Amino acid sequence: MKQPIWTPSSARREGSNLWTFADQMGLSLTNSTYEDLHRWSVENQFTFWRSVWEFASGIGDLGETSHIGADGPETRFFPDANFNLAENYLRRSGDEVAIAYRGENVVERSLTFDELRLSVARVQQALQLEGVQQGDRIATLLPNGPEAVIFFLAAASLGAIYSSTSPDFGSAGVLDRFGQIQPKILVATDSYSYAGVRHDVTAKVAQIADQLPSLKRVVMVNYDDQPLEANVPLSVGLDDWLANTEHREPEFIRLSFDQPIYVLYSSGTTGKPKCIVHKAGGVL
């Protein structure tokens, strides 16, 4: 039998969250295996998920009822739950690094937990000034950088629904996706870097914005500190958009376990991409 490339020490195993959780459930991994824990979680799924919430000190209230309906695809978990995904994700504060981002050799940034909370709070306020409410859609055309996380958390804090596509998609591919969800706000980068080459996407963003009649605002994000010159309908630069916001703590609207939190898409190989709705409870 081949030996594993690496095996954690006993101290490392016994200091892990999984080990501690199993101990609390009466399934000490000293005398049991991971397979035993997995089997227990499947056979006792409602107890398992409530126990995970309690172990992780979830913020909010799961309610007394664990599920409605028979055990199967139609089961509704925690129908009386009341919580906010972003509130749970943003529980930490301080000057430790929360996000570290490097875009090839062009952009390098980091945000502490305090900076992340403040950034989310400011975007949250700006969204509210645009009239964004629970159920409104926020669409983003951004690299996988800090702004993508910030706008996701700000949308979730208000019960708005986040969606994203890659800035290297063509305009038709973006419209095939965003055209289905009718976003109120579009957040778009002005460029991205691939293989060391800067790609300006402002003309594409203008074309997309012109064909999304539901839009109230387009927020342009400057990717690499080069001058932002975007002739995009309804557009404003991110810094100007945030100008009337305050430095304060974010607020959170607590919602149901089944609250839609973001929309992703199938590949579109058999027609237009299909919307895939993810809900807050499953994401958390």
Image (cartoon, rainbow, N blue to C red):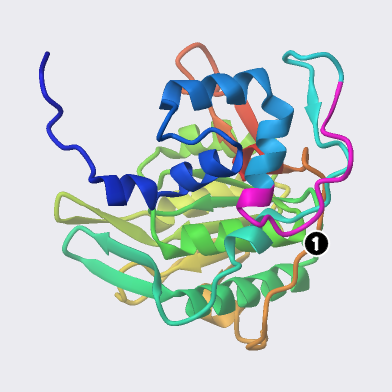
**Which segment did they paint magenta?**
54-68
Residue at figure coordinates x 61%, y 28% from the top left = 276
Q: Is residue 239 left or right of residue 130?
A: left
Quadrant containing the C terminus in the rendered view: top right
Q: Is residue 15 left or right of residue 25?
A: left
Residue at figure coordinates x 72%, y 32% from the top left = 47
Q: Is residue 190 left or right of residue 127?
A: left
Please tell me whether residue 81 is drawn above or below residue 153 in the rendered image: above
User: Looking at the rendering, which quadrant does residue 84 occupy?
Assistant: bottom right
Q: Residue 162, position in %: x, y?
A: 63, 49
Circle 1: element type: loop
- Visible in this render: residue 274? no
| Number of numbered discs overlaid on the protein picture | 1
Q: Residue 167, position in %: x, y?
A: 40, 48
User: Looking at the rendering, which quadrant does residue 264 occupy?
Assistant: top right
Q: Nearer the viewer, residue 30 or 119?
A: 30
Query: Which residue in the structure is indicated by mark 1?
Result: 253
Residue 254 falls within the magenta-colored stretch: no
Quadrant containing the N terminus in the rendered view: top left
Q: Nearer the viewer, residue 38 or 108?
A: 38
Q: Residue 204, position in %: x, y?
A: 43, 49
Q: Nearer the viewer, residue 254 or 30?
A: 30
Residue at figure coordinates x 15%, y 37% from the top left = 6
- Visible in this render: residue 192? yes
Residue 55 falls within the magenta-colored stretch: yes
Residue at figure coordinates x 49%, y 22% from the top left = 36
Please tell me whether residue 221 is drawn above or below residue 178 in the rendered image: below
Q: Is residue 14 left or right of residue 196?
A: right
Tell me the kind of residue under disc 1: Ile
